[in-house]
Amino acid sequence: STSTYTEEPEDMGFGHPLQRMVNLETLDERSEGFLGNHALYRMPVAGSSSTSSHYYFVDFEAVVDEYLAQYAAVDPQDVVFVQPEPDGPPSNIPSLILRSIPSAGQELAILQHLNAGEVRRDPWNPAPRLLYAATKGERTVLCLERLFEYDQPPFQTVYDVVDYVRQTLEGLSFLHEQRIVHAAYGDHRGVMMDIGRPSMDAFDRAQFPVRYYRISFARAQQLAHDASIHGPLFQKDVRDCGAMLARQFEGVPRVYNKLKSLTGAMMGRAFGAEDARKLFEALCKSIDSATYETRL
């Protein structure tokens, strides 16, 4: 069985930087000339990619068939990058990430939930954009929008750190609102970023905003809608996230004490994800523009 996911563009919202704002998304002109053209796909190649705001008619079944033919023995936890032929028309060919997951597990259902309707459009949603899913017996192949390593190039300023922490906490708060326990939110290796442009060439964090996503939900589970978000599984997510942030940003200039207060609270109390997000928002109110521009 197969399924394709699409979404409609939303109007831009405005508000406090830490409030939820829905980003304006555009649609490229669609071309049917590439359907079924297997030459468009070459795997795996790291490099340039599509952006998260562009949508294409793609022969996903051809991509999945080629993936299964070439990478049948690949570790299910590995991701494969699909890169178009370099001499192909770049405006009509996307780059993709492919993952193989168990058909019977919760991950597929959770990703489908996180890619549906208003849930997908929520700007705090940390799930990768699922473009297509093809179930082939015991395995399901996911076609995801292309993302990049979250720390390449490395963070340059205090603002980069604050933005990463903010999005990390928003994402965890969002998942817990959906009663989803991630169970691996403290593993920074599962973080990737959307840079909103075709490639990393000349990418500069100071000029191009990024969005951070969690590439895997392999250990996630969705609990009952009336489950307490202060339950032990949710609190473990918060503690793991706090420990990760403490390791990542120890000694960051001028905001280290604020981050230490945040991560200490996350690891040492019965803290919820939204509690952590609100604490971080309060701590950020006293940060001035000069501090944000401080180089790491």
Image (cartoon, helix red, strand yellow):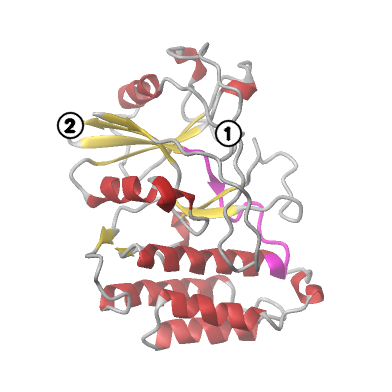
Q: Residue 28, position in %: x, y?
A: 61, 28
Q: How many marks?
A: 2
Q: Is residue 38 left or right of residue 100?
A: right
Cα distance, mark 2 to mark 1?
31 Å
Which residue appears at 63% of the width and 46% of the height?
195
Image position of 68 (left or right of 26): left
The majority secondary structure of the magenta stretch comes to loop
User: In the shown orientation, is residue 265 left or right of residue 166?
Assistant: left
Task: Tell me, yes or no, whether the two marked residues, 2 and 1, touch with CB atoms within 8 Å.
Answer: no
- The span shown in magenta is 145-159
Q: Which quarter of the figure has residue 268? A: bottom left
Q: Amino acid at mark 2?
A: Gly
- Residue beneath disc 1: 54
Tell me if residue 86 comes above or below residue 167 in the rendering. above
Relative depth, front residue between 178 and 68:
178
* The label number, if any, that marks residue 137 in the structure image: 2
